[in-house]
Image (tube, rainbow, N blue to C red):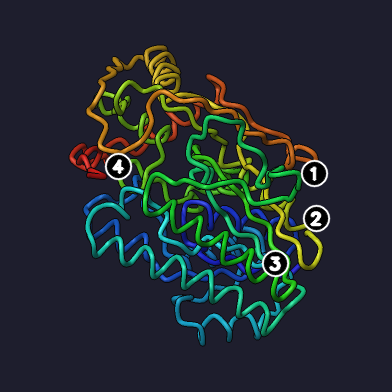
Amino acid sequence: MKILVLGADGYLGWPTCLYFSQRGHQVTGVDNYFRRYASLELDCEALIPTPNLVQRAQIWEELTGKKIHVHIGDITNYGFLLSICQKYQPDTVIHYAEQPSAPYSMINQEKAAFTVQNNLLSTLNVAYAVKASAPECQIIKVGTMGEYGTPNIDIEEGWIEIEHKGKKDKFLFPRQASSLYHTTKIQDTDLLWFYVRTWGIRVTDLMQGPVYGISTAESDLDPRLMTMFNYDEIFGTVLNRFIVQAIVGHPLTIYGKGNQIRGYLNIRDTMQCVYLSAIQPPASGELRVFNQVTETFSVRQLADKVSKVGEKLGYQVHLKHFENPRVEKEEHYYNPQYTGLLEIGLQPHYLSDEVLEKMFKIVEQYKANIKTDAIFRGVSWK
């Protein structure tokens, strides 16, 4: 297949390029380096120094003989994106090219405005570029389980059937996000659902939980192929942050009571989920929704797992309950359904002590790069 990865320099985008390329597909990666620039601006750069996207692609080609085409540019510029789609005629567009951080979206009005503008305009442009250049192409949009919030009912897989006054109909499951970032992801879903109904395009919306992990089979070939691993409050995901905090002796930053439950998955499973979705596309005129998680944990359960493994490896791990800077329920029901990806072939990597030990050992190699003042700054939702 011809695969176009938007946001190809990011935490998930770069491993996705490698995963498809390794399996013989023609891959084109596009990025505008937003995350690199934002990390520099906020003094919270990634733990592991990574070559830029052009250099990464060159390293990959030297190691494997497989070429990844790279274009540096901003897909909120419709002319730029359309020219890429017209040139490569993709079979699948994988859309990661969004501002990906809830805390970033809550820093101030400027960051909020950028989040809205970037995320909605990029998604709008993807829909238009696909319709204009490759109408049979599938759009895979990586959404978030955060769109659903924490309703007091089971979270169905994207859709819910409702009976009202003797009649039934099927609707997108109600959304109630807890940050501006997550709200823009709801609006992404609504935009794409509108164009699915109007134009008959085909879309898979992956409602992804927080991802953890550093390495994939492809990056194991050479450390220069490692992904962008953030450990800070702005761009780092919770388990990745906890590992770094344990190694550097910073108390694990448990927000509030730590009873917030979410669905999680290993970065290697993200690769599987996106790949399985690409090779088994939905029909034209279909919005297919998968809940992309493999296990659920509370924040406190994750902290306890990290503490146990850290102490086994010789670290003194401290847990600390911080006043929760977010506005969210800390005691809640949470039961998401997530069978769709298993049904199309997902083979999960579950969170084991061995997985955590491997993460500890990789992070240990870069311990000197950890800046403790970047770990927690208390970006407040209020």
- Extreme residue in the front direction: 165
Q: What kind of residue is marked 3?
A: Thr
Relative side of 331 to 153, left or right: left
Q: Is residue 113 above or below residue 132?
A: above
The tag on residue 233 is 4
**Residue at which label 2 appears:** 280
User: Which secondary structure lies at badge 1?
Assistant: loop
Q: Is residue 337 above or below residue 298?
A: below
Q: Looking at the image, which is closer to me, 345 or 225? A: 345
Q: Amino acid at mark 2?
A: Gln
Q: Is residue 38 left or right of residue 1?
A: left
Dot 2: within a 10 Å radius of its alpha carbon, few (fewer than 14), some, or many (20 or more) residues?
Answer: few
- For disc 1, the marked residue is 344
Distance from the alpha carbon under mark 1 to that under mark 3: 17 Å
Question: Which structural element holds mark 4?
Answer: loop
Q: Position of residue 47 (x, y in %)?
A: 34, 45
Question: Separation of disc 3 and disc 4 at Cα?
Answer: 32 Å
At which x and y percent is residue 262? Answer: 50, 32
Give the residue type that dot 1 points to. Answer: Ile
- Give the structural element (helix, strand or loop) at label 3: strand
Residue that carries the numbered disc 3 in the rendered image: 92
